[in-house]
Image (cartoon, rainbow, N blue to C red):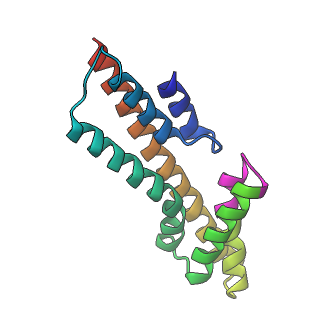
Amino acid sequence: MCLIIGLLGCIVPMIPGPPISYAGLLLLHITDKVQFSTSQLVIWLLLVVVVQVLDYFTPIIGSKYSGGTKWGSWGCLIGSIVGIVFFSPWGIIIGPFGGAFIGELLGDRSAREALKSGMGALIGFLVGTVFKVVVCGYFVWCFVKALV
């Protein structure tokens, strides 16, 4: 059940997908059905931590690589936080885009440049989502493989 909720959490911003999927593997580990090695559990935990941290920074990186400035990066960060806190669940998608766009406009960039930075933030968010889906999918595969 945790693995299904974890996969759902990759798409629904209010649910932390990879940590819940990892919890599913831990729950399987404490049963008498499967025993994972300590190194597997530690590597999977590190993978979850890296993906969770990247998930917050990929919109900023996307904004930066699409020509954004510090204004856009800060706007993306602030927009992400405001989006998560006040406009969930859609705020996590709209927040980085809107924050980068507004940040670039405040930094005296043209609307076209600001839009490009906002689109980069959106693409960064989508890349982070793909990372989470891949990790959770891998955890599902490990779960099924261990039981079969």
Instruction: Let me know if residue 94 is in the magenta part.
Output: yes
Q: Position of residue 61 (x, y in %)?
A: 48, 67
- Quarter of the rendering occupied by the C terminus: top left
Q: Identify the image quadrant of residue 97.
A: bottom right
Region in magenta: 86-97
Rendered residue at 55%/29% (across/down): 5
Residue 137 position (above or below residue 64):
above
| Left or right: residue 132 compared with residue 41 | right
Of 30 and 64, the residue lying toward us: 30
- Main SS, magenta residues: helix
Instruction: Let me know if residue 142 is in the magenta part.
Output: no
Of 108 and 44, the residue lying toward us: 44
Q: Position of residue 95 (x, y in %)?
A: 69, 60
Rendered residue at 61%/69% (across/down): 77
Q: Is residue 130 visible?
A: yes
Q: Position of residue 130 (x, y in %)?
A: 46, 44
| Left or right: residue 77 compared with residue 90 | left
Rendered residue at 52%/39% (across/down): 17
Residue 124 position (above or below residue 30):
below
